[in-house]
Image (cartoon, rainbow, N blue to C red):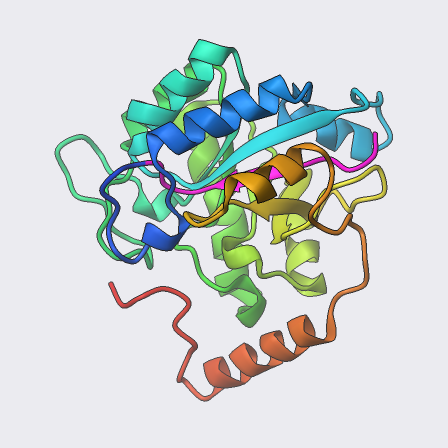
Amino acid sequence: MNAVPVFLYHSVTLDPPSWIAPLTVSPRTLADHLDRIVGSGLDVIPLRRLVAALHGGPPIPARSAVLTFDDGYADFYSTVAPLLADRGLPATLYITTGAMHAPGRPPGGSLFPPAPMLSWGQVEELDELGFEIGGHTRTHPQLDTLSGRPLRDEVAGCKDQLEDALGHPVSAFAYPHGYSSLAVCRMVREAGWTSAAAVSNAFSSPGDDPLRIARLMVHTDTGPELFRLWTEGAGAPVAPFPERVRTRGWRSYRRLRARLHRPYQALPAA
């Protein structure tokens, strides 16, 4: 196991809300990506197999890839799941629980602006179909600006909501915006999550931290040549690597703004 591309997608639609459009790909693009991944000879494995290997368990195939989708957009049910099922590919769906809604009721309780989101019934059905359901907090905040009870409510509260809805343990977590810190990782571990996905725009590897799994974020303007390089294990650094100075500086800036009650708006106002 060398460079492992853990692909990160968001919405997959032809008509996304403007605020998520830069992170949206079309159904045709996703289908092309999936075919490129399979055609490159990569073994698409469930996230849990990578996590087990990172915890010292059985090694994964030498050329492996993982598919992840963040937030819980409605198009995962209508568009993404059929594309994956047609190809027999596993994926992990990280759910922001406050953005889910009961049938016939609008979503609420998250920081997201309006967007079509999954219902709890659809999440349960996707779980029954074999897609791994993971947690992405309750409201999608910048976790590294929180502490104490608010941080615990987002991390542990999300886990409780998912397990109550699905009726079984969940173990995979993802940091909103990729933002974390040592204190956030500690809270994630204490809450019982056994893995946590970051962003990093890098490949994972045998030495990666299971609580900071590196992923490659796919944008609407991610070109076919770059994507081809990713499927060949090139075009991005390989984790782990020391936290960048600019990452620490960006965290300090956002924390300062939060203390001054002028938080940085990572998402447009809802």
* In-image side of 93 versus 43 (left or right): left
Is residue 6 one of those drawn in magenta? yes
* In-image side of 148 versus 76 (left or right): right
* In-image side of 83 versus 256 (left or right): left
Expressed as whole percent of the image width and height from the top left, the position of residue 247 reads 66, 71
- Dominant secondary-structure state across the stretch colored magenta: loop
**Does the rendering let one see residue 238?**
yes
Q: Residue furthest bottom?
A: 260
Quarter of the figure with residue 147: bottom right
Expressed as whole percent of the image width and height from the top left, the position of residue 119 reads 27, 32
Expressed as whole percent of the image width and height from the top left, the position of residue 206 reads 84, 37
Relative to 149, say whether 250 is above or below. below
Relative to 86, say whether 202 is above or below. below
Q: Quadrant of the C terminus?
A: bottom left
Magenta-highlighted residues: 1-12
- Residue beneath the point at 67% across and 75% down: 246
Quarter of the figure with residue 179: bottom right
Along the viewing direction, whichever of 119 and 16 lies nearer the viewer: 16
